[in-house]
Image: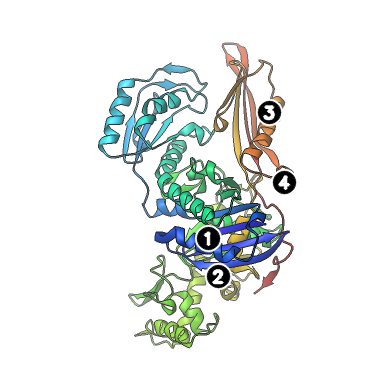
Amino acid sequence: MIVGLDMGGTHIDAVIIKDGKIINNIKRAYDSNNLFQDLWGSLQSLLNDYDKSQIKRINLSTTISTNAIVEDKTSSVGMIIQSGPGLCNDFLACGDENVFVSGSIDHRGNVVQELDISELKKAVILFKDKNINNCAIVTKFSTRNPKHEIEIKKFIEDDFSFITMGHSLSGKLNFPRRVFTAYLNAAVYDSFKNFAINIKKSLEKEGISAPVFILKADGGTINLSTTENIPVETILSGPAASFMGMNAFFSTDEDAILLDIGGTTTDIFFLADGIPLFESQGIQINHYKTLVRSIFSVSMGLGGDSSIRIKDGQLKIGPKREGPPYAFGGPMPTPTDAMITLGLIHVEDEEIFKKAKKSIESLTNGLNQSVEDMAITILNTMAHMIKNRIDELLGEINSKPVYTVRELLYGKTITPKSIQIIGGPAKVLSKILEKRFNLPCYYPKNHHIANAIGAALAKPTTEINMLVDTSKRVLSVPELGLYERVDKNYTLDDAKKRALSLLEKEALNIGSDKDIVETEIVEESSFNMVRGFYTTGKNIRIKAQIKPGLSYKLKDGAIDVKS
């Protein structure tokens, strides 16, 4: 059995999948202030009649890290940055305090200038005076030689709770993105650590010993213990679960729009010839550009529980969720109340129906509309907002090269041929969206728990970046902390074979099943290094990954329902 849990903005969705079939599922509202009780209660409800010893693994997606950043609830972070000569420091500043230290390492990994220990002593005093407990250390060419990052960490580690080193997060060369990635990793550490503790307590309370994996932004998973040190990888974990859920249900080789319409947000994805678009350099969250690999997705503050108000005679939906729908005790009318009013969501309790209708009626004052017309206007406005945002995104995407998970598509223009929808309101909104877009809309019969299904079926994945300098006879893989000697005649083919071999071993460390691991080289280059008139060696670069994907397709439930 595999258990999948998705912790969205309002609900915990959970499923049990056995032999490719969904054998149980739940949807439960939760309170982030009472996380342990809600997680434990969800696991109790889900697993009450099942043998817990048969659970092979638990895959979980969460908005914990994303919400901490978006809601500005991150921990204080002290940044120690070594930018080297020739680079302005101002634009790199992030976190609560920044100390720019001297010393440098060049692009080939040679130490040009050593560290000044007195600067590190001043940094420690400054951070402790400001009650900063988490730090990030980033030096410009640490992916080529992490010596200075490691030395700084050793000097300060007794004074701080958590320290991130930039080279341990990515082997890519983009220095500013590595600075911001390291900052966010340290900033969300405490939030994610608390979340991980609650997960472990909940599992212990239920007597579950199965390994736990967290969904990453690229659609793969990574085990919980590893994620505690690199929580930045869980940014956009929720949208990744959305995509994997849609991937489990839908299949197409055409351009398409994918939508996950939840209680708080609508997540938007695109397919180019059936392949998801990809963030080629990494996620941008708020104004921070990172090196975190991700499926391309955009969230807009629009969902079934978005607050509705009339402002200057105009209907406004979202972007905030002020609470549950008015019908269920919330403070303001929502699109869910409109759906209940129109009978599109059936409720047994007549009082709930009356509350929903009353909330929509409150919006009609001065607008000369019936309650039913106002409810219809609300749903049409939602569709209009989604259509406008997608048109904007397609304009941006089609104005530059299109990157998919597999390749760069030169000259590709995305022209969607269909819309595929999951989420609680998917069935209700499909007909409205079909009319607005003039495209066929599809939703699966399990649309309300598709995220949990996507989380359950996601495979573990990771990537490595390898650099070989044959003149120095050094091979390095920063993500693995691997630095080894090679022969001066080392070739590109040798490097590719070594990279794939390392990935196969790493697959076991991240908990992947050996029989479903797919490794691939996604980038490769080799060029001569010349000094004077002579070739001194080769610079070889390899990026390889364990491909994200589904463990298997569902044997049931994967039925496309046309609106």
In front: 265, or 125?
Answer: 125
Disc 3 from disc 2: Cα separation: 46 Å
Sequence order check, earlier mark of 4 and 1: 1
Three-letter amino acid code at disc 1? Answer: Asp
**Quarter of the image with the C terminus in it:** bottom right
Q: Is residue 293 above or below residue 326?
A: above
Sequence order check, earlier mark of 1 and 2: 1
Disc 3 from disc 4: Cα separation: 20 Å
Which of the 4 image quadrants contains residue 14?
A: bottom right
Q: Nearer the viewer, mark 2 or mark 4?
A: 4
Which of the 4 image quadrants contains residue 90?
A: top left
In the image, residue 494 lies at what x, y percent? 71, 25
Q: Is residue 342 above or below residue 125?
A: below
Disc 2 from disc 4: Cα separation: 31 Å
Residue at 57 percent of width and 31 percent of height? 480
Q: Are marks 3 and 4 in contact (CB under 8 Å)?
A: no
Sequence order check, earlier mark of 3 and 4: 3
Sequence order check, earlier mark of 3 and 1: 1
Find disc 4 in the rendering and name its residue: 516
Mark linked to residue 498: 3
In the image, residue 236 lies at what x, y percent? 51, 52
Drawn side of residue 333 relative to residue 19, left or right: left
Q: Nearer the viewer, mark 4 or mark 1?
A: 4
